[in-house]
């Protein structure tokens, strides 16, 4: 099975997925996997232009794969149309990390104000229609995409038959994102005095940093002591909420800044006790799963993708329930760490790669 993975936006969770798929599928006997990437910047241009760039590279290639896997950052329709004739019979599987129909566009994005975001929404539908198979990273993501795509197409005036959402549903399935297995998770470690709360998400609006501040403020207001480990990625502009957290909790921040290496990151996970997270969008939650693998106890708003794979004891609906579960798990940390680790272990890369391999074999008769 000779596979080609295309990653037009090779950074962050996209790069994590692409490199993990290549590495672990390659370890399965009888598989060879090549990875083509483009820099993780200019995401809108990647959606428009990556298809042509990869098709141009395919025209110069001396060998061709049995199957192509790409991400939602590539317009599969334009890519397939631009491929050299000898490549056009190769099946294409598209992996949806996120989608533009339900992703919360920033109100500061001028293209949202002008309605241009609808271009990218339709591009997702067109791309999924052109793909031979579609993978979503969670059952929640699959459900919200299909529902949003149905509503989108219902608004179109006529000639909608070429974009059947039912056809997309019938050629789609769920493949979770893989994570690395935790080494020396130390699940029996005691909760710190005070407990350390981890933030390991991007410092961007969709990850809910304002809600994070609200929730830790609620803990503080109830007299609960804690420290903070802030290792989320920042970009050019520092969000005001991050500075607000630094100003209010400067005396109890144990770490502040993106971990420079995997080893440093793992060490921070081992120092963390809790994760409190309430994002405005989450289609899977790689950073949450990674932390859980190391026994970090998650307290997650019961929304987005989390109810589809996180046990109910880690979910909260209200601030009062968050406070109650904080107290419960603080007193039952060993049990909480064990449950968190067991939940995350279902997403270890060898298991995910095996699931992918078996499905590709069966769907496309590749042996």
Image (spheres, helix red, strand yellow):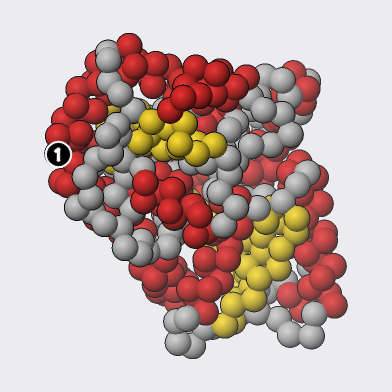
Q: How many discs mark residues in the rendered view? A: 1
Residue at 24 percent of width and 40 percent of height? 191
**Nearest the eye: 252 or 274:** 252
Left or right of 253: which side holds 42?
right
Q: Which secondary structure lies at badge 1? A: loop
Callout 1 crowding tier (Cα within 10 Å): few <14, some 14–19, many ≥20: few
Q: In this view, does 330 lie above or below 84?
A: above
**Nearest the eye: 337 or 367:** 337
Residue 211 location, x and y as percent?
A: 45, 21
Residue 2 location, x and y as percent?
A: 59, 82
Q: Where is mark 1, residue-wise?
A: 332
Residue 305 location, x and y as percent?
A: 39, 38
Left or right of 248: which side holds 117?
right
Q: In this view, does 150 lie above or below 38?
A: above
Residue at 85 percent of width and 67 percent of height? 56
Q: Is residue 327 above or below residue 348?
A: above
Q: Is residue 324 above or below residue 65?
A: above
Residue at 23 percent of width and 54 percent of height? 187
> Splitting the image into 4 quarters, where does residue 130 fall?
bottom right
């Amino acid at each position: 099975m000779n596979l080609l993975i295309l990653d037009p936006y090779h950074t962050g969770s996209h790069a994590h997925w692409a490199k993990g798929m290549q590495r672990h599928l390659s370890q399965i006997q009888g598989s060879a996997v090549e990875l083509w990437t483009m820099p993780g910047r200019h995401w809108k241009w990647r959606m428009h232009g990556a298809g042509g760039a990869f098709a141009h590279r395919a025209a110069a290639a001396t060998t061709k794969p049995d199957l192509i896997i790409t991400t939602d950052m590539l317009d599969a329709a334009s890519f397939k149309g631009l491929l050299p004739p000898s490549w056009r019979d190769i099946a294409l599987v598209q992996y949806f990390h996120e989608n533009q129909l339900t992703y919360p566009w920033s109100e500061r994005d001028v293209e949202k104000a002008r309605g241009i975001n609808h271009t990218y929404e339709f591009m997702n539908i067109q791309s999924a229609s052109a793909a031979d198979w579609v993978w979503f990273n969670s059952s929640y993501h699959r459900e919200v995409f299909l529902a949003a795509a149905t509503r989108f197409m219902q608004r179109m005036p006529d000639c909608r038959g070429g974009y059947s959402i039912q056809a997309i549903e019938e050629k789609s399935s769920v493949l979770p994102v893989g994570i690395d297995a935790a080494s020396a998770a130390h699940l029996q470690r005691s909760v710190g005095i005070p407990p350390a709360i981890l933030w390991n998400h991007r410092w961007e609006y969709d990850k809910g940093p304002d809600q994070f501040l609200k929730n830790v403020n609620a803990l503080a207001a109830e007299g609960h002591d804690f420290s903070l480990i802030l290792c989320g990625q920042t970009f050019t502009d520092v969000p005001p909420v991050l500075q607000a957290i630094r100003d209010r909790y400067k005396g109890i921040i144990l770490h502040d800044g993106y971990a420079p290496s995997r080893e440093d990151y793992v060490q921070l996970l081992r120092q963390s006790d809790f994760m409190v997270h309430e994002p405005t969008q989450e289609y899977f939650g790689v950073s949450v799963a990674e932390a859980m693998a190391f026994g970090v106890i998650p307290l997650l708003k019961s929304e987005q993708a989390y109810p589809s794979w996180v046990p109910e004891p880690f979910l909260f609906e209200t601030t009062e329930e968050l406070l109650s579960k904080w107290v419960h798990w603080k007193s039952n940390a060993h049990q909480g760490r064990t449950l968190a680790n067991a939940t995350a272990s279902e997403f270890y890369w060898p298991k995910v790669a095996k699931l992918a391999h078996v499905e590709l074999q069966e769907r496309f008769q590749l042996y």
